[in-house]
Image (spheres, rainbow, N blue to C red):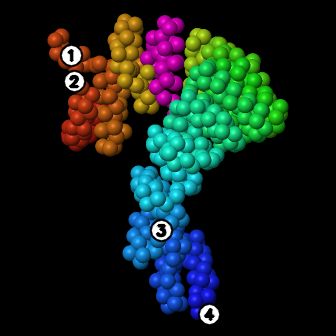
Amino acid sequence: MQTRSVKPVREHLNSVMNSLGRAGMVAEAESMFIRLPEFDVMPNEASYSVLMNAHARASAADRAEGHFDEMLRARVQPGEVSFSCVINAWARSGNPARAEEWLERMLKTRVQADVVSCNTVINSCAKAREVDRAEMWLQRMIGGLRIVPDEVSYNSLINACARGGDVCRAELWLEHMLAERLVADEVSFSSLINACARDASAASAAKAEAWLQRMQDDGLAANAVCHSAVVNAFARAGDATGAERVLQQMLASAVKVSEVTCSSVINACAREGQVARAECWLEEMAALRVSPDEVCYGGILNACAQTGEVEKAEYWLRQMSAAGLRINAVSYNTVINACARVGQVGRAEQWLERMIESSVRADEASYGSVRKACARQGDAERAEQWLLRALEAGAAGDGAREEAEALRENLGRTGGPLKKALYCFYSEGENLKIREHLEKALEYQWVYGYPRVPAGEQQLTHGTFKYIAGMQPLAAREMLRVVPEAQVVP
């Protein structure tokens, strides 16, 4: 009677340990394993395997391997299940080399490997982007091991090839999979479609569309991700017509359209200078109940700027604001540059002023567009005023000194807003302000190139000017102590 009762008790205890392991209670499972002899039960392969699986889930492959060795010392014969547990443990720990070692060890001990063990190794290699290793194991399954690969085997390799950008290789294995009369699922096709879509070429976009069509021909429902990848592939290849065609197919198939998909089409039209088509799609988004984002409006603004349609650019910038979207520096700069390029300096200045009033930081491009527009119209003094404002805002850029030199030559005189600014710094009676004013004055001096240095000598560096600025307050404070009524810092 006692012999007949051992098996049910052991199975029950193994089941309890398995539940603890699945719940992440590895220490409790270990404790029960140690107590098995208290129930007159000796652990079998299943007992060790349950424990090894618990450590595998906790990514403790070394502990799983340790229990395998303990099982051998206890003279418990390892089988397919116990080897698979250690292989899985190393695979889950992100160590495909160790997983491979254990599969090789399994084969050398003449334990029959199954498709699950091989798939675990293939998938581990695939995740580590070791495509050659994953491919080698799939070929061994087909050849010497005589294990029939399943959909998981092929999908792991196809996905690895796709992620590595090897489209031809991914296509080859998908064709092989279909030739074996295995059913390719959404994962198989979507991996390949995404791989084609990542290459910004017309040929790759056409391939992505062809695989999308084949997926649908095989009775699989292509989701929004697959469609969007193809739309984006055509957009990146500069084919607005192709992007529109796939988007139309999405709408006809009642596939949910996102703002990302629409923005791809809008930007594709914009890059071709097709403002009207881009506008139609932006307006269509409202009918689709998809809210345009900054990228969608940005595409329209770029299209208008490229074609010189300033009024339209201004209109869409206002629409962007009315939609509750925050206008960023890129959008403002697009409109400012559009106005400047067609010589409408006043409008460019107005948008730059509005940008500053909106607390959006105007950068080098913002001021540069306006300055260059002024210079093109021969208004050097106006350009110099904007250069001064750029300097005050810390947005003059590396070429500011050369630009100031050119402006000074154009003015042909010693005056001008920038030169005058060098002499108009007041202390306001506060010693802390003195350093600030002197630093700013010396900053302008360096950018403007004043004072002029004798011929054959080099201009002092910016760092030297800043060092002098740091030393000047000592002299300035002494000057104010001696002459309290002094108000102008020379």
Look at the picture and state if 287 lies above or below 430. above
Residue hosting label 3:
78
Q: Quadrant of residue 190?
A: top right
Question: Up-down: is 471 above or below 61?
Answer: above
> First in sequence: mark 2 or mark 1?
1
Is mark 2 in CB contact (under 8 Å) with mark 3?
Answer: no
Distance between the alpha carbons at the discs numbered 1 and 3: 88 Å
The span from disc 2 to disc 3 (Cα, nearest Å) is 80 Å
Instruction: Quickly name the residue at label 1.
Output: 453
- In magenta, the rendered stretch is 360-386
Q: Residue at x 54, y 65 (%)?
A: 81
Residue 399 belongs to the span the image colors magenta: no
Circles 2 and 1 in contact, beta carbons < 8 Å: yes
Say which amino acid is labelled 3. Pro
For the stretch drawn in magenta, the main secondary structure is helix
Q: Earlier in the sequence, mark 4 or mark 3?
A: 4
Q: Secondary structure at mark 1?
A: loop
Q: Which residue is mark 4?
A: 1
